[in-house]
Amino acid sequence: MTSFLYLAGLILLLTVAASLIRIHIGPTRAERMMSAQLIGTSGVGTVLLLAGAEGNGAMIDVALVLALLAAFAAVAFVKASSPDGAGDPEEDDR
Amino acid sequence: MNLAEAFTILFVVAGIFFFVAGTVGLLRFPDTHTRLHALTKADNLGLGLIAFGLAFRMPDVWGVAKLGLVWLLAVLAAATVAQLVARAALDRLPDLDEKGGAR
């Protein structure tokens, strides 16, 4: 059973490798940010699988923090990418 | 192999399937917004199914609650980020040629 969970974690790491390809190709900066978001989520998935394999509850906190950081990274990208830095979805005078 | 392990395997396989589908979509789709669409599927559904599958293995209710919390955070983050990135990418689209690559 744990070997199955480790195999699933390995497949998730392969998806991380695949999203690195998109980072290399990605014409626009948004695609690179999306792949970074996918890497964050695959990381969270992998840590969850490892937590499930070893029945270790503390690793779920690691996954929680990783999910939080991935979200903040994407928000930072959006705030940096809009000219006045506000990145406010409502303001349309750009 | 009791029922709980069967459920775990079933849901984790489903979660992995959505992750791989989202990643393939991210690589193969023609332009930014369709890639973003594929990506958020992988985020929400893939992670949700994996978390749900693993909940059967958690010894106590706190582990299940934490798994639910991780999934809830991931869902909220992915939804919000998808909107923001989509809007940020909207007006800055370079004139893409038909294959979706920047001209």
Image: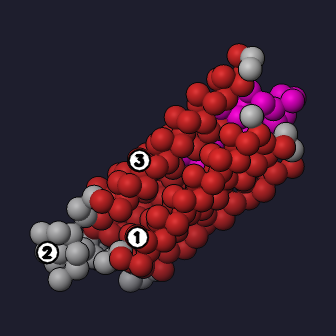
- Viewer-closest of A63 and B3: B3
Q: Residue at x 87, y 29 (%)?
A: B60
- Viewer-closest of A67 and A27: A27
Q: Is residue A82 above or below residue B18?
A: below
Chief SS of the magenta region: helix
Q: Is residue B71 left or right of residue A35?
A: right
Could you tell me residue A9's position as x and y percent? 65, 51
Is disc 3 placed on a helix, strand or loop?
Answer: helix
Range shown magenta: B52-75
Write down the residue under mark 1: A22
Is disc 1 placed on a helix, strand or loop?
Answer: helix
Write down the residue under mark 3: B21
Image quarter in which the C terminus of chain B is found = bottom left
Identify residue type, mark 3.
Ala
Could you tell me residue B68's position as x and y percent? 69, 37
Q: Residue furthest left?
A: B98
- Distance from disc 1 to disc 2, alpha carbons, whole Å, reads 17 Å
Could you tell me residue B87's position as x and y percent? 34, 64
Mark 3 or mark 2: whose residue is earlier in sequence: 3
Q: Residue at x 54, y 59 (%)?
A: A14
Q: Quadrant of residue B63?
A: top right
Identify residue type, mark 2.
Asp
Q: Is residue A12 left or right of residue A79?
A: right
- Same-chain check, marks 1 and 2: no
| Dot 2: chain letter | B
Camera-near label (1 vs 2) is 1
Identify residue type, mark 1.
Arg
Write down the residue under mark 2: B97
Is disc 2 placed on a helix, strand or loop?
Answer: loop
